[in-house]
Image (spheres, helix red, strand yellow):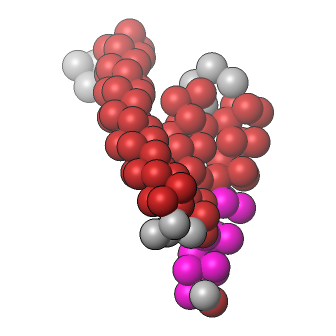
């Protein structure tokens, strides 16, 4: 009977790991926002094009979907779908042009 896991310990561990993932994704969203801002700045100066913005913008949506997943699954799926479209179209445009 000592091998029976305590549900409250498992729930606490899951909550701790979810909180850690939220912090990691928040930091990554900020990094991708900075990358997007630099690409927009390059586009404004005429040295870059808007194709390069799609993939980092998609990763911002992936992070937003991961952060909202524990509370709102439907919103998370919508954000992940938008991210999928942005990232794949960014990759296709990067290889085509």
Which residue sits at x=35%, y=14%?
12
Which residue sits at x=72%, y=52%?
81
Residue 7: x and y, percent? 41, 15
Q: Is residue 85 shown left or right of residue 40? A: right
- Specify the segment rendered in magenta: 84-95
Which residue sits at x=73%, y=32%?
75
The outermost residue toward the top is: 8
Quadrant placement of the N terminus: top left
Residue 46: x and y, percent? 51, 66
Q: Is residue 46 shown left or right of residue 69? A: left
Which residue sits at x=75%, y=42%?
78
Q: Is residue 17 visible?
A: no
Residue 87 sits in quarter:
bottom right
Relative to 74, residue 91 above or below: below
Q: Is residue 82 visible?
A: yes
Q: From the image, give the main secondary structure of the stretch colored magenta.
A: helix
Inspect the magenta stretch and tell me whether residue 87 lies in it: yes
In the depicted view, which residue is nearer to us: 69 or 40? 40
Q: Is residue 72 shown left or right of residue 16? A: right
Relative to 60, residue 21 above or below: above
């Amino acid at each position: 009977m000592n091998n029976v896991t305590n549900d409250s310990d498992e729930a606490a561990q899951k909550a701790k790991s979810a909180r850690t993932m939220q912090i990691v994704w928040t930091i990554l969203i900020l990094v991708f926002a900075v990358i997007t801002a630099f690409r927009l700045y390059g586009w404004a100066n005429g040295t870059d094009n808007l194709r390069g913005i799609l993939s980092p913008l998609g990763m911002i949506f992936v992070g937003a979907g991961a952060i909202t997943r524990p509370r709102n699954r439907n919103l998370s799926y919508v954000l992940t779908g938008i991210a999928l479209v942005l990232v794949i179209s960014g990759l296709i445009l990067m290889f085509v042009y």
